[in-house]
Each structure stands twice: as C-alpha cells, then as structure tokens.
Image: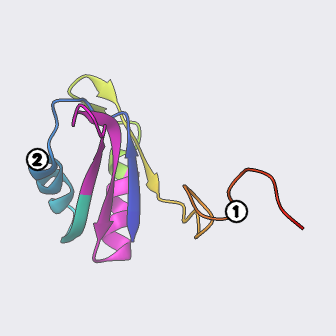
Amino acid sequence: MKVFIAGLPLEVDEAELTAVFGDFGPVKSLRIIKDRETKESKGFGFVEMVNEDEAKEAIRCMNGASYYGRRITVNIAEDKGPGFNGGGQKGGFRRN
C-alpha cells in the first residue's frame, strides 16, 4: 500500500523516515520528493509498505502527529492515473 506524507521537516532524510515507518512493518520503497535544481526536500514524500494493515496502522498513528515540531499529514496515496503530471494532450493549436 502506498502512503502519502506531507509536512515533512526539511532535515528528515529517507533513511530516517524508512526507520520510522519500519517500526510499523516492512517498507518496500520510500521517496522524499526533492526540488530538481536545489535537491532540497519539498516537504512531502511517499512510502510503499508491504502489508496493507501495517500501512493503515502507520497512517492511524502518524497522521496529525508532531515530527520535529511540525504537524505531519499521513494518508493513503491517491492514484492520479496516466493522465496526471505530463500525460494526456499537450497544448497548442490543432491542424485539421
């Protein structure tokens, strides 16, 4: 199950976040989203956990919790589908 995390403190790295979620169960993958130019965290990321029940327990326990003094949001990641973020038709005029 894929989990979305928002409000991450900028000093948190992937190894630390993997350990935090690992307390609930095995982590399949984890990614903190970073700015392309500065390589700094954008304050959100995704965790994919092996077991759905463990992922739901992590969400239940961590959503709204304080992490380094910041309130984080943790919930089920929405699947935006293939048309999200660059997919689908491009702009411009159409020739007949």
Secondary structure of the residue carrying numbered label 1: loop
Q: Compared to 26, does 94 lie above or below?
A: above
Q: Residue at x 33, y 48 (%)?
A: 45
- The structure residue drawn at horizontal position 24% and vertical position 60%, both measured from the top left corner, is 30
In the picture, measured across the screen, residue 38 lies left or right of residue 72, that is left
Q: What amino acid type is highlighted by mark number 1?
A: Gln
Q: Residue at x 23, y 67 (%)?
A: 29
* Residue beneath disc 1: 89
The numbered disc on residue 16 is 2
Identity of the residue drawn at 11% across and 47% down = 16
Magenta extent: 31-60
* The N terminus - image quarter: bottom left
Q: From this view, report whether residue 67 is shown above or below residue 26.
A: above
Q: Which part of the image, by quadrant, shows the C terminus? A: bottom right
Mark 2, other Cα within 10 Å: few <14 / some 14–19 / many ≥20 = few
The amino acid type found where label 2 is placed reads Glu
